[in-house]
Image (cartoon, grey):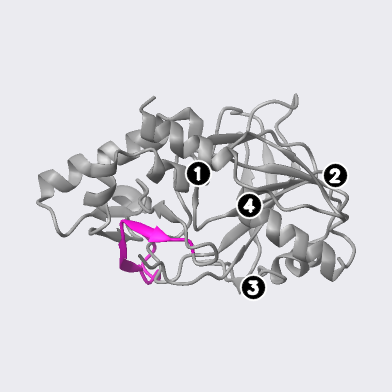
Amino acid sequence: MEDYALDAVKALTTRPKPAYGTIALDPLTPVLGAEVSGVDLSQELTERQLAEIKDAFLAHHVLVFRDQDITAEDHKRFAAHFGPLHPVALAAPDSDPYVLEISASAESKNVAGNGWHADGTADAEPSLGSMLHITRIPEGGSGGDTMFANMHLAYELLSPTMKTFLDGLTAIHDGAQPWGEQGPPADYEVPVNEHPLVVRHPDTGRKLLFVNRPYTKRIPQLSATESKALLEMLYQHIAGTPLLVARVRWQPNTLVFWDNRCLQHHAIWDYYPHSRYGRRVAIDGTRPHA
């Protein structure tokens, strides 16, 4: 590993962590994620509990809450402490507009999130983050893990010359791309927005890499060939650097809260033909800025 990359990792792993009095944390890796204990999400949380969870969220980016037997209303109540709830795109008329069912079975031909991505980056204001509550894991108890990748560190591991080059670029994000050749439904208003390639986290000010394969279409400052080559290099950098990644192994009644602004995630579909079920609630975000 290059010296600048070693320095970036050392700086991240030696950053002071907040002290907590009402929750306990067990880190997933030195650079990403933590399991939280001492919290019952079926109950109203105290102001101090919420403040400590918010501090932990900014410090670790992925929070895992085990053994949470909660209703959809409990789920939404907890999410609303972090901001207005983000409506589900193309929600069915008789469904809760803020709760997305995540379901896979033997009849599934694909599953949501099967590939590295951040949610809804083609939107003008992508979501702050999501809370996924899994209630049924694949039969036999194995498979269906979710991987998360730290986009702060993805940026920091690039060479100084590459970081300087990327800092002045933008990218077009196209909401039609994830639909593939069949295209989106006719009644879907496809979002297309231009965002900086490198943005700053709105709460911490830290720089991060803001591209992902499903939504990022092109870099308008470059030729088509240059844009394709640079984006492919960045996608391979993200997918091929294990140091960026924390892996969550699901158990029934686990809730995971991740920061969509500075992470990508990959829901691994390695359990066909078995089933998996959960509910996701997302939180409104803001427009990304350099």
Crowdedness of circle 1 by 10 Å Cα count: few (<14), some, many (20+)?
Answer: many
Q: Is residue 217 left or right of residue 260?
A: left
Residue depicted at 35% across the width and 27% down the height = 2
Q: Quadrant of residue 40?
A: bottom right
Q: CA distance from mark 1 to mark 3?
A: 22 Å
Quadrant location of the N terminus in the rendered image: top left
Query: Does the segment drawn in magenta span residue 145?
Result: no
Q: Does dot 1 land on a helix, a strand or a loop? A: strand
If you read the primary sequence from the N terminus, does the residue marked by circle 2 or circle 1 appear first? 2
Of the numbered discs in the image, which one, if any, rests on residue 83?
3
Q: Does dot 3 land on a helix, a strand or a loop? A: loop
Residue depicted at 50% across the width and 44% down the height = 150
Q: CA distance from mark 3 to mark 4?
A: 18 Å
Residue mark closest to the camera, 4 vs 1: 4
Residue mark closest to the camera, 3 vs 2: 3
Q: Which residue is mark 4?
A: 59
Of the numbered discs in the image, which one, if any, rests on residue 67?
2
If you read the primary sequence from the N terminus, does the residue marked by circle 4 or circle 1 appear first? 4
Amino acid type for the residue under numbered disc 1: Asn
If you read the primary sequence from the N terminus, does the residue marked by circle 3 or circle 4 appear first? 4
Q: CA distance from mark 2 to mark 4?
A: 23 Å
Q: CA distance from mark 4 to mark 1?
A: 12 Å
Q: Which residues are magenta?
A: 184-201
Whether label 2 touches label 4, CB < 8 Å: no
Crowdedness of circle 4 by 10 Å Cα count: few (<14), some, many (20+)?
Answer: some
Q: Would residue 138 be seen by someone viewing this image from the given angle?
A: yes
Which residue is nearer to you in this view: 252 or 179?
252
Of the numbered discs in the image, which one, if any, rests on residue 150?
1
Q: CA distance from mark 2 to mark 1?
A: 26 Å
